[in-house]
Image: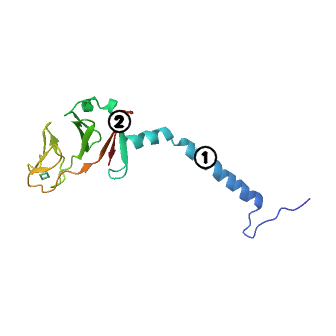
């Protein structure tokens, strides 16, 4: 009978294979515990940081955007306003003065922090803010009834 070769560290080839197989089985078991669907759902709930990628929104999910003048928050910080004729404005609601979230009253943005005001396009109309609200390019897709915001 052939004697099994033993490596200089004292473990045999059979030991090595046994340990490797155990590692693979444990790794697979750990992966199976991760709920991929939950991970994907979390990715939807917490989208990538703004400024990272275009994001498409189905307009049927935002009936407020159906008419000219309608508006809706599409993320916790980004508002979209329907300008009519398939044109939309998307603005970051973060005040450019000291980063408080501005409020929209249907015609202008007002910052509760120190009173800055911005028009519907995000342009400063009242200080102390000196910079306009950050805006994002919006593309309307009529066939798919969606908009894509370049955040
Ligand atoms: S944080 Fe908006 S005006 Fe100061």
> Residue at point 21% right, 49% down?
94
Which residue position is annotated with label 2?
146
Residue nearest the viewer, comparing 60 with 35 = 60
Residue nearest the viewer, comparing 86 with 55 = 86
Residue 79 shows up from this direction = no
> Residue at point 59% right, 44% down?
29
For disc 2, the neighbor class at 10 Å (few under 14, some 14 to 19, many from 20) is: some
Q: Quadrant of residue 90?
A: top left
Q: Position of residue 79 (x, y in %)?
A: 24, 41
For label 2, being within 8 Å of ligand 1 is answered no
Mark 2 → mark 1, Cα distance in angstroms: 40 Å
> Residue at point 32% right, 52% down?
51
Residue 28 is labelled as 1
Badge 2 marks a residue whose secondary structure is strand
The residue furthest front is 85
Which of the two labelled residues, at mark 2 and mark 1, occupies the earlier sequence position? 1
The residue furthest bottom is 8
For disc 1, the neighbor class at 10 Å (few under 14, some 14 to 19, many from 20) is: few
Q: Quadrant of residue 17?
A: bottom right
Q: Is residue 54 above or below residue 63?
A: below
For label 1, being within 8 Å of ligand 1 is answered no
Residue 43 shows up from this direction = yes
* Left or right position of 132 against 62: left
Residue nearest the viewer, comparing 112 with 67 = 67
> Residue at point 51% right, 43% down?
34
Q: How many marks?
A: 2
Q: Position of residue 100 (x, y in %)?
A: 17, 50
Query: Which quarter shows the N terminus?
Result: bottom right
Residue 44 is labelled as none
* Left or right position of 82 against 118: right
Q: Position of residue 40 (x, y in %)?
A: 45, 41
Of marks 2 and 1, the one in the foreground? 2
């Amino acid at each position: 009978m052939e004697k099994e070769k033993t490596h200089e560290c004292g473990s045999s080839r059979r030991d090595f294979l046994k340990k490797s197989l155990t590692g693979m089985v444990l790794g697979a078991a750990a992966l199976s515990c991760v709920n991929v669907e939950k991970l994907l759902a979390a990715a939807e709930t917490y989208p990538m940081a703004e400024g990272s990628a275009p994001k498409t929104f189905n307009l049927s999910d935002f009936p407020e955007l159906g008419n000219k003048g309608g508006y809706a928050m599409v993320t916790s910080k980004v508002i979209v306003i329907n300008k009519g004729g398939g044109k939309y404005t998307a603005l970051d609601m973060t005040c450019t003065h000291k980063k408080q979230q501005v409020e929209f009253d249907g015609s202008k943005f007002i910052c509760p922090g120190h009173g800055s005001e911005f028009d519907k396009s995000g342009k400063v109309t009242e200080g102390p803010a000196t910079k306009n609200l950050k805006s994002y390019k919006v593309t309307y897709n009529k066939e798919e009834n969606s908009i894509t915001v370049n955040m």
